[in-house]
Image (cartoon, rainbow, N blue to C red):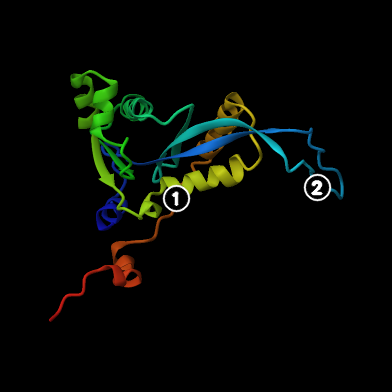
Amino acid sequence: MEDVLDVYERPIDEAHPLVCMDECPKQLIGETRIPIPARPGEPERYDHEYVRNGTCNLFMFSAPLLGWRRVEVTERRTRKDWAEQIRRLVDEDFPDAEKVVLVMDNLNTHSPASLYEAFAPEEAKRIWDRLEIHYTPKHGSWLNMAEIELSVINNHGLADRVETLSSMRKQVAVWTQKRNNGKSTIDWRFTNKNARIKLKRLYPKIKD
């Protein structure tokens, strides 16, 4: 925990941009009946029944100090899917960075093994060497600022039912562009000093 919090206190460094990464599944939900649009004095009405059209996955990359994020909608969340997203991060999103400081949870796909499964050894090592990894602790995913961005998109960008993969990608693209145009940053205030007070029960007791 303290390792991640130390990273969050670093100043902005163009050569070492801070990026938080997370992912979440989304259901593709279709309507069984055409919703009735809202009218003056009456809210929108829709049937509680729905058609499940499968699932997709959202890869969220957020640079909280820069007000930037990229959200990619994929059909799956395999090792190769993650590896391709990481390649894009270092080669397309931050090609001039010396190293990308990446905060993420310790999911089994979030490892160098995924890069070696997707790319030739030389390419996999090249990509991994461009990263400075900081994993959030077990049961500590709330320390990942990318979760804040996922909460925003789920509550404000994708609050309604989305029926198809193409529709999901369009809505995500609109939300992402709006957030990036507004340079929406995250004001993270939880520090190691706070942790040692509020979470002191988690620290070992040292006898005098």
Amino acid carrying label 1: it is Ile
The quadrant holding residue 77 is: top left
- Element marked by disc 1: loop
The quadrant holding residue 201 is: bottom left
- How busy is the neighbourhood of tag 1: few (under 14 within 10 Å), some, or many (20 plus)? some
- Residue located at (33% from left, 41% from top): 107
Task: Report which residue position mark 1 lands on.
Answer: 186
Quadrant for the N terminus in the image: bottom left
User: Residues at badges 2 and 1 in contact (C-beta under 8 Å)?
Assistant: no
- Residue located at (43% from left, 54% from top): 187
Considering only vertical position in the picture, is 52 above or below 42?
A: above
Quadrant for the C terminus in the image: bottom left
Q: Residue at the left extreme?
A: 208
Residue 39 spot, x, y in % from top left: 85, 43
- How busy is the neighbourhood of tag 2: few (under 14 within 10 Å), some, or many (20 plus)? few
Task: Report which residue position mark 2 lands on.
Answer: 43
- Residue located at (74% from left, 33% from top): 32
